[in-house]
Image: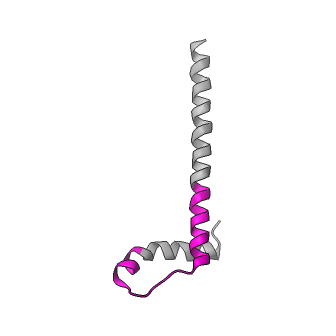
Amino acid sequence: METPDDEKFLAMLSKSQSQIRYTVGQSIEPEDLEEIYNRCRNFVLRSERIYLVTLSDLEIEEYQAVM
């Protein structure tokens, strides 16, 4: 479910490459940068957990197949 903040951050990130390249003096609010950083960090941490759980499940299945 998207929130207005989700849409705002997506628009910021989508436009950031061309804005950085072609615009002078454009900046992003520190609070917005911190929120984007936190969301990215949470995504990475969740991805790592999913990877570790999946790896663990595969190792258990492999061990059971050998027995």
Which of 12/27 is in front? 27
Asked if residue 16 lies left or right of residue 66, the reply is left
- Is 47 situated above or below 7? above
> Looking at the image, which residue is at 62% across and 31% down?
57
For the N terminus, the quadrant is bottom right
The residue sitting at the bottom extreme is 25
Q: Is residue 36 above or below residue 22?
A: above
Q: What's the image's color scheme?
A: one colour
Q: Quadrant of residue 66?
A: top right
Specify start and end residues of the magenta stretch as a single range: 17-43
Instruction: Using the image as rendered, state which of residue 8 and residue 21 is in the foreground.
Output: 21
Q: Position of residue 13 (x, y in %)?
A: 48, 72
Rendered residue at 39%/87% (across/down): 24
Residue 33 falls within the magenta-colored stretch: yes
Where does the image place residue 42, in percent across and percent down from the top left?
Answer: 62, 57
Secondary structure mostly taken by the magenta-highlighted segment of the chain: helix
Instruction: Name the spot of residue 60 as percent of width and height, x first.
Output: 62, 24
Q: Quarter of the image containing the C terminus?
A: top right
Q: Residue furthest left?
A: 22
